[in-house]
Image (spheres, helix red, strand yellow):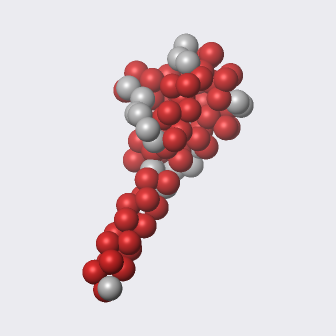
């Protein structure tokens, strides 16, 4: 039984890191601009693509990250690495 708890604990930590990672910072950044639809139009990407980035099912390219940062005024180091600089 102890082994199952350890596996669950490790999985929970991975999920928590994912939530606190790039997808969550993308969500916060895009919300600071407005809606997903507005941001998608502004950076010339589909709304579906942005939603996938926010859900963490796919990742934006470097040029997409740059476009989001330029659009929102978000520091790229915060968006990518989550350093202590807030959007």
> Residue 50 placed where, x, y %?
54, 29
Q: Residue at x 71, y 31 (%)?
A: 34
> Residue 71 placed where, x, y %?
59, 24
Q: Residue at x 65, y 29 (%)?
A: 36
Viewer-closest of 3 and 38: 3
> Residue 44 placed where, x, y %?
55, 13
- Please, is residue 10 above or below residue 60 in the view? below
> Residue 84 placed where, x, y %?
49, 55
In the displayed structure image, the side of residue 2 where residue 65 appears, left or right: right
Q: Residue furthest left?
A: 3
Q: Residue at x 43, y 59 (%)?
A: 15
The quadrant where residue 8 appears: bottom left
Viewer-closest of 6 and 81: 6
The quadrant where residue 48 appears: top right
Q: Visible in this render: residue 47?
A: yes
Q: Residue furthest top?
A: 44
In the displayed structure image, the side of residue 19 where residue 31 appears, left or right: right
Q: Residue at x 53, y 17 (%)?
A: 45
In the displayed structure image, the side of residue 19 where residue 28 appears, left or right: right
Q: Residue furthest bottom?
A: 2
Q: Residue furthest front?
A: 1
- Please, is residue 81 above or below residue 57 in the view? below
Which quadrant: the N terminus? Answer: bottom left
Which quadrant: the C terminus? Answer: top right
- How many discs mark residues in the rendered view? 0
- Please, is residue 31 above or below residue 13 in the view? above
Viewer-closest of 9 and 69: 9
Q: Visible in this render: residue 83?
A: no
């Amino acid at each position: 039984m102890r082994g199952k708890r350890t596996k669950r604990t490790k999985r929970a930590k991975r999920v928590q890191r994912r939530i606190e990672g790039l997808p969550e910072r993308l969500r916060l950044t895009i919300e600071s601009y407005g809606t997903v639809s507005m941001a998608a139009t502004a950076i010339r990407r589909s709304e579906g693509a942005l939603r996938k980035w926010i859900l963490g099912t796919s990742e934006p390219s470097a040029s997409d990250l740059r476009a989001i940062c330029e659009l929102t005024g978000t520091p790229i180091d915060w968006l990518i690495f989550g350093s202590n600089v807030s959007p």
